[in-house]
Image (cartoon, helix red, strand yellow):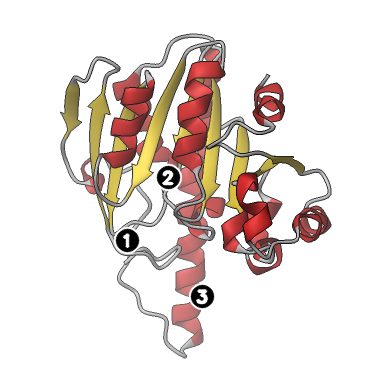
């Protein structure tokens, strides 16, 4: 069990999907390179010493991840590559957003796809015309900087391109882990309810942008967009919000303008 966030031990597998349909696999367990977040089997008891040990371990784990994230950031910066970390709950529409973005971005796009299992999303990205690396985390509930480093090594994105990191669907743990990205995007769909900023404040506090997706469904759901925007900015006064429909393209130009 991951001592930082409580998720199951990750069994990371990387599969590269070229735009032409070719695939390549990266083998090996996450511990083979020593860069993943640690798995310490200390159980938190009532004893203060054990609680202190667990806290110190969590701090050390995140510090190690931050060091690897800084290396990723330097690697990307040297090549003029913009990396964006897309986070959401499952089903918010991240992959649909990326499918439409690939065709309209105006510069090369590659994608690192994070899911516990399957190649479904990476296959969708390939069919949309971009190369992708699928990172399957097994029981792990988030990507970390070491996984992204390995994916970048396989992906080898072009200079002056955009790399989207589609994180594992989860509104909790991905907010803890710096991946080396330039900016963070939280995608929320109107079908999820307008109370998410207050329920998951760490995620919204970490965001540079909130994409309010599936606005084409607003006439059919009980959702107060003004409340979501107000609560998000109460938590993070600097956060920007872009309402869009990735399915219909409604207001999609606002998303592309933010991408630059």
99 versus 107 height, above or below: below
Q: CA distance from mark 3 to mark 2?
A: 24 Å
Mark carried by residue 39? 1
Q: Say which of 12 and 163 sits in front.
A: 163
Residue sticking out furthest to the front: 219
Query: Percent position (x, y) of residue 131?
Result: 34, 21
The x, y position of residue 33, in whole percent, is 26, 39
What whole-number distance in Å separates the C-alpha atoms at marks 1 and 2? 14 Å
The label nearer to you, 1 versus 2, is: 2
Kindly identify which numbered label has been placed on residue 52. 3
Location of the N terminus by quadrant is: bottom left
Compare marks 3 and 2 and give the one earlier in the sequence.
Answer: 3
Q: Mark on residue 144?
A: 2
Instruction: Give the CA separation, mark 3 to mark 1.
Output: 16 Å
256 on left or right of 45? right
Q: Quadrant of residue 145?
A: top left
């Amino acid at each position: 069990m991951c001592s930082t966030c409580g998720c199951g031990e990750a069994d990371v597998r990387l599969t590269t999907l070229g735009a032409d349909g070719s695939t390549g696999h990266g083998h090996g367990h996450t511990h083979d390179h020593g860069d993943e977040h640690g798995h310490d089997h200390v159980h938190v008891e009532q004893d203060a010493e054990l609680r202190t040990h667990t806290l110190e371990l969590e701090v050390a784990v995140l510090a190690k991840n931050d060091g690897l994230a800084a290396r990723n950031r330097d690697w990307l910066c040297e090549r003029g590559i913009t990396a964006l970390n897309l986070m959401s709950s499952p089903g918010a529409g991240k992959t649909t957003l990326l499918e439409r973005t690939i065709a309209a971005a105006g510069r090369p796009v590659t994608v690192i796809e994070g899911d516990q299992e399957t190649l479904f999303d990476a296959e969708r990205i390939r069919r949309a015309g971009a190369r992708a690396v699928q990172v399957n985390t097994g029981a792990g509930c988030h990507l970390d900087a070491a996984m992204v480093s390995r994916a970048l090594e396989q992906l080898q994105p072009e200079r002056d391109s955009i790399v989207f990191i589609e994180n594992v669907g989860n509104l909790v743990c991905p907010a803890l882990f710096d991946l080396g990205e330039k900016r963070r995007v939280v995608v929320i769909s109107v079908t999820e309810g307008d109370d998410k900023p207050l329920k998951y404040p760490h995620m919204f506090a970490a965001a540079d942008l909130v994409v309010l997706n599936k606005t084409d469904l607003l006439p059919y759901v009980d959702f107060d967009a003004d409340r979501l925007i107000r609560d998000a900015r109460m938590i993070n006064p600097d956060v920007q919000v872009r309402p869009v429909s990735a399915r219909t393209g409604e207001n999609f130009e606002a998303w592309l303008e933010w991408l630059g």
